[in-house]
Amino acid sequence: MNWIISANGKMYDHASAFQELGYIDWTQKAKYEVDDIVYIYCTKTYKKIMYKTQVIKINMDFQEITDDKIFWIDKEKYNDSLTGNFTRLKLVEQTDS
């Protein structure tokens, strides 16, 4: 299945995270399945889909995720983000559409 989610670049540095890690552990709010494709729509200044990712892991808890605090611009939001389940999104390609 294909999904589109939105991302706020004023809270998290997605580009640097993808460049360094090759993936992002994202709060899981949908019923993703492994191998689903997730397009990430970047809000505000960009206003376009910039990343095509693939779900490689689902239903991860806090202890399984990568500590990515260095990529959080809004450090207060980082602590708020550490609840619930997570999914791992592997970068397939960066797009400009």
Image (cartoon, grey):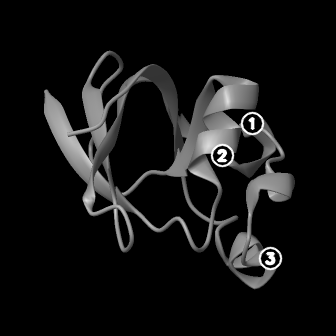
Q: Is residue 90 visible?
A: yes
Secondary-structure class at tag 1: helix
Q: Residue at x 66, y 46 (%)?
A: 61
- The alpha-carbon separation of the residues under discs 2 and 1 comes to 6 Å
Q: Is residue 3 left or right of residue 15?
A: left
Q: Residue at x 63, y 23 (%)?
A: 22
Q: Quadrant of residue 15?
A: top right
Q: Nearer the viewer, residue 45 or 41?
A: 45
Which sits earlier in the primary sequence, circle 3 or circle 1? 1
Locate the C terminus and report the quarter of the image it occupies: top left
Secondary-structure class at tag 3: helix
Disc 3 residue type? Lys
Q: Residue furthest left?
A: 1
Say which residue label 3 marks: 75
Say which residue label 1 marks: 64
Q: Nearer the viewer, residue 61 or 41?
A: 41
Q: Position of residue 60 (x, y in %)?
A: 60, 38
Say which residue label 2 marks: 61
The answer to whether marks 2 and 1 mark residues whose Cβ atoms lie closer than 8 Å is: yes
Q: Position of residue 70 (x, y in %)?
A: 86, 55
Q: Is residue 46 left or right of residue 76?
A: left
